[in-house]
Amino acid sequence: MEPPSPDHRRRNLRIHGVALGLVALAWVALALALGRGPPERAIDLSGLVAIFWGLVALGYVALTSTAMAALYRRRGAALIIHGIGFGLVAGLTSIGAWIEREGEVVHPAEIARAAGEGAALRVRGCLSVDALRLAEPAADPLDPSDTSDTNETSESRLTIDLVLTNACAGALVITDVDLIGFPPSGGNRILGAPGRITETIPPAGARTFTLRAELPGRDDGELRRWGWRSNVTLADPEAALLCFATADAPATAGCRPIEAARIGGRR
């Protein structure tokens, strides 16, 4: 085969020089764009990005120049070398852009979770427990088995009123309410959880949730030193759980306060 003429060698070198010039211009343009643009994240990584692409450009120059040193005498060598090089760089750039787009995609489940957390925080700020009242239930004169009017019983029965007030802009649907008592001696008692309910509290409205409890050997003096925590479940945001607690209840981080329980006589 006839060897290439000096014109072919000069053409390869010119193409190589033009290609390297384009690589240098592309890197300078990228560095200037990164320097002028506002940071997209809390930590500005534009300098590191410019350095990374600078190293890529230097690697491109080194590899293609090495290949040209060995092949510049061959006809069309520069076109083949830089065609492959530009193709690889374009492919890597496309893959990097795709990875970045995928990393920024917010999936619907994540959007719903974030929205639910935000709504729960808003509700936590405007739903409150305005009163916690504990009293013995009134005796039923028509029920001879009702012994709640005796001075001492093996089990003291309590009627517990938990008053929730809605200061939110919209109505709130309550699906569950419970109350946990913490005696000063330690431990806890889950009192009168009524199970699943559906109760709507309108804006600027209040609802009283009545629970029942039986405490063996209840003493009002000791009962005044109990701590109380109530867990309230909302239908919207879905299954949002809010907690309310008195100051002397344990593990009350994140709970809105409840005033000390009011302990009255018979109801």
Image: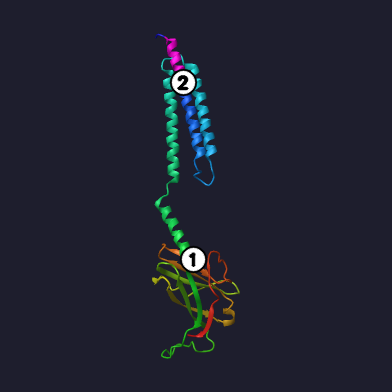
Give the x, y percent position of residue 18.
46, 22
Give the x, y percent position of residue 217.
55, 82
Residue indicated by mark 2: 16
Identify which residue is drawn at 50% across, 24% down. 63
Q: Three-letter amino acid code at disc 1? A: Gly
Q: In the structure shown, which secondary structural element does the residue marked by tag 1 occupy?
A: helix
Between 247 and 154, the one nearer to me in the picture: 247
Whether 7 is among the magenta residues is yes
Give the x, y percent position of residue 220.
57, 82
Query: Is the residue marked by circle 2 packed among few (<14), some (14-19), or many (20+) residues within 10 Å?
Result: many
Residue at the extreme top of the image, as rendered: 2
Using the image, determine if residue 45 lies above or below residue 217. Answer: above
Identify which residue is drawn at 48% across, 24% down. 21
Q: Earlier in the sequence, mark 2 or mark 1?
A: 2
Q: In the structure shown, which secondary structural element does the residue marked by tag 2 occupy?
A: helix
Whether 24 is among the magenta residues is no
Q: Can residue 61 be seen in this view?
A: yes
Q: Three-letter amino acid code at disc 2? A: His
Tally of numbered discs: 2
Q: Which mark is drawn over residue 203? A: none
Q: Can residue 197 be seen in this view?
A: no
Using the image, determine if residue 120 lies above or below residue 10. Answer: below
Between 232 and 220, the one nearer to me in the picture: 232
Residue at the extreme right of the image, as rendered: 185
Identify which residue is drawn at 50% across, 76% down. 131
Display colour scheme: rainbow
Q: Quadrant of residue 185?
A: bottom right
Residue indicated by mark 1: 125
Query: Is the residue marked by circle 1 packed among few (<14), some (14-19), or many (20+) residues within 10 Å?
Result: few
Identify which residue is drawn at 43% across, 43% down. 102
What range of the chain is rendered magenta?
3-17
